Amino acid sequence: MSMPEDIRTHEQGPTFKRKGLVIGINYKSWASHPALKEYVLHSCVSDAQRARDFLVSTCGYEPCDVRMLGDSQVTDEDKAEDEYEDSEGVRDHETLPTRDNIIRAMEWLVEDAQHGDKFFLHYSGHGGQVKDMHGDEIDGMDEVIWPVDGTPTEGHITDDTMWNVLVSHLPSGCQLTAMFDCCHAGTMLDLPLVYDPSTGKIKHKSRLMHQRALRPALADVVSWASCKDSELALELSELALELSDLALELPELPTCPSPTSTPTPSPSPTPLGGGAMTSIFYTSLQKDPHQSYMALYADIRHALRGARQRPQLSTALEVVLDQKMRII
């Protein structure tokens, strides 16, 4: 596919990799469990598809270099018979977002990383919190994501695990951009620097800074999150994608249920539904994929003004927030 000249990323000299991993989990298999069926999500797989389309169509990533995990093909019968995990007869079983598949895909994303490589991660699904066992969290809680084969009490993937797999081994000059559209997403990658909109500056998370000083990140890692660690994320109908109307609609929208709280049941399925953060994030970047971190953050904050979620921006290294984003 031919890309506009300003979108192309051919450079002189050594070649570099651009890879993406997008994950969307609707938890269709939870529908067979009385305690969980109310909390099945409806638009996370389509959110992941939107992220993939952005990387391929807008950023010019090669389709073969963008891996997608989703559970749109999982049925209740598959879950009951465990076919979604181990049956060779289940279509695309390796792309189902089980815990093992997610971790393997994260390892694939950053394997053999070299200076100049660019990686992108998108996650839409349930996020939660569990007790911090390492003493590196100010609030005493680790943030976690829930694979399709997990439950609210086991099988999760912690922020510590994601740091170890995705961040800790990246070399200097390598870039990883992550976007988490889920509840309790604020510091999902456990990055030590967090943007404070009240001061317009990056602030240090003291306990994480101490931990990371023992094994500091070398790469340029930036994580976008739909909400603070203590907050729930919103879903919305894609009928409300226009940013000029989005902020007016959000306060009335229901929150996505969090397995670690006592949430309200999920709303009825909306065919064109989507996460609020996902919708705003990619709509803004499609308009201007070369905008600065601060421009995108301001766009998101403006669209979510008055809503019950506050977007978060965290980094592994000090970054100049007025510089252009380097996803492309």
Image: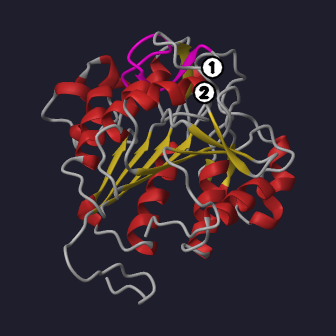
**Disc 1 vs disc 2: which is toward the camera?**
2
**Circle 1: residue type:** Ile
Residue 318 screen position, x and y as percent: 55, 51
Q: Magenta residues? A: 140-157
Residue carrying label 1: 138
Residue carrying label 2: 206
Name the quadrant containing residue 319: bottom right
Residue 148 shown in magenta? yes
Residue for point 52% across, 33% down: 188
Residue 311 shown in magenta? no
Indicate the quadrant containing the N terminus: top left, top right, bottom left or bottom right: bottom left
**Circle 2: residue type:** Ser
Q: Tell whether label 2 touches label 1 (CB within 8 Å).
A: yes
Residue for point 25% across, 83% down: 12
SS majority, magenta: loop
Element at badge 1?
Answer: loop
Residue for point 71% across, 30% down: 231
Residue 98 screen position, x and y as percent: 32, 29
